[in-house]
Amino acid sequence: MKILKGMLAGVLLLAGNGVASAPWTVKIKSEDKVYTFGGPLLEKEKTLVGYWSGTNTDKAGQFKWEILRRANHTYTLDMTWIEEGERRKFFGHGLWQVKGGKYRFADLTDSEMEQDEAWPIDVKHRISAEDLWVVEEDVKFAGPDKLVTVSEGEEEGEMITNTEVRVKQFQRLFMRRFNQPNGKREELILDQIRRASIDDFADLPGYFTGLLTDEEKKLVGRWKGSNNDPDDPGEWEMIRRPDHTGTIVFISGEDDEGELKAAHGFWKVRAGRFIFCDLTEGDKILPWDEIFLGDETVVQIAEDKIITQWFDSERRVLGGLFPMRVRNTELPVDEFKFPAMKPYSKEDPFDAAAFLKRIQAAKRKREPRVVEESATNP
């Protein structure tokens, strides 16, 4: 039991600062059912946190895997199997839980998935919400060092027994990196999973809201900024609030500052990344395909200056060897100059409660899903 407690403590560290103390939840729809993952770690789930290696009784598939289950109900999985005589491989991240005698899990990212450039949430390897699948297995035994579950096989009446044993270290190439705790890496993985779970406007507030970190407290207030982009120089004025909402006016090129409208959205800082998403133009909520949730690398955060940067891979420098680096610099101000921001100079008329209510009620336009029929179908 001492070994288990020690490993659990290590995985709690892996989960990142504040992860265990601020549980989050996400709803996933699978086969017309809605599952809620996340929340506080249950007592019966604590023994499943840590490093595990597994196999099952599917002789044809020869499934083998290593999995890291974290205390924040996320996991990282590396699995291999045989299909049609060929060796297949999966590496990705997802969510897990134990409820009602069932062990449930859902992959949210797949390393083989290409990034959907049309999707407004900047996240790699995302599995689309329409393709998510929650797997349910009956728990037969769950101890400190062994987990046994049973699931249905592909053949009618076939039952597969899945057995996992606790390991001290991972052996697989992609999993070895997790043998040593790395808080920043874990924060980035959690952020990737949380971004992958965003499917509509209502999912956005929960991604951003939470207690301010000490670093974020320095960003709260009124700021003016500019960039060094040679092709698209810009300036902006912005107010950031303690509830992670923000209001901004950005001007570039030949924009008439008198005609510009303030945009409202969210912001936060995690794992050295400044993350942002504007959701309105004036009072109008932007269409889903016109928003963008992205991030920039933090260079400096101080009481009197903020510097972030991003790289444009489509614009190259030094003979095409490197992507162009664009830096953004912000300085604090007492009041704003842009007409649309002047109301926020002394007072702050922004109604956060009304804004959140509108965002949570908004729905993105969904295209009808096309189901491909086989050639044998009439």
Image (cartoon, helix red, strand yellow):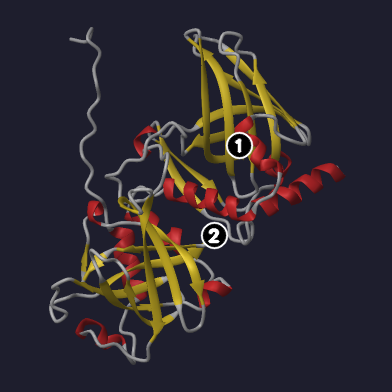
Quadrant assignment, res 48:
top right
Residue at 52% of width from left, 27% of height from top? 90
Q: Residues within 10 Å of mark 1 (few under 14, many from 20)?
A: few
The answer to whether residue 242 is above or below residue 110 is below
Is disc 1 placed on a helix, strand or loop? Answer: loop
Give the residue type at disc 2.
Ala
Apparent side of residue 270 relative to residue 29 in the rendered image (left or right): right
Give the residue type at disc 1.
Gly
Residue at 46% of width from left, 77% of height from top? 219
- Residue 90: tell me if it is visible: yes
Q: Which residue is mark 1?
A: 100
Q: Nearer the viewer, residue 77 or 349?
A: 77
Please state which of the two labelled residues, at mark 2 or mark 1, is closer to the viewer: 2
Q: Extreme front residue here?
A: 319
Residue 237 % position (x, y): 30, 79
Q: Which residue is mark 2?
A: 271
Is disc 2 placed on a helix, strand or loop? Answer: loop
Whole-angstrom CA distance, mark 2 to mark 1, is 35 Å
Q: Nearer the viewer, residue 195 or 322?
A: 322
Q: Nearer the viewer, residue 349 or 305?
A: 305
- Residue 209: tell me if it is visible: no
Q: Extreme right residue here?
A: 2
Residue at 66% of width from left, 20% of height from top? 55
The answer to whether residue 360 is above or below residue 351 is above
All told, the count of numbered labels is: 2
Apparent side of residue 182 relative to residue 88 in the rendered image (left or right): right
Q: Earlier in the sequence, mark 2 or mark 1?
A: 1
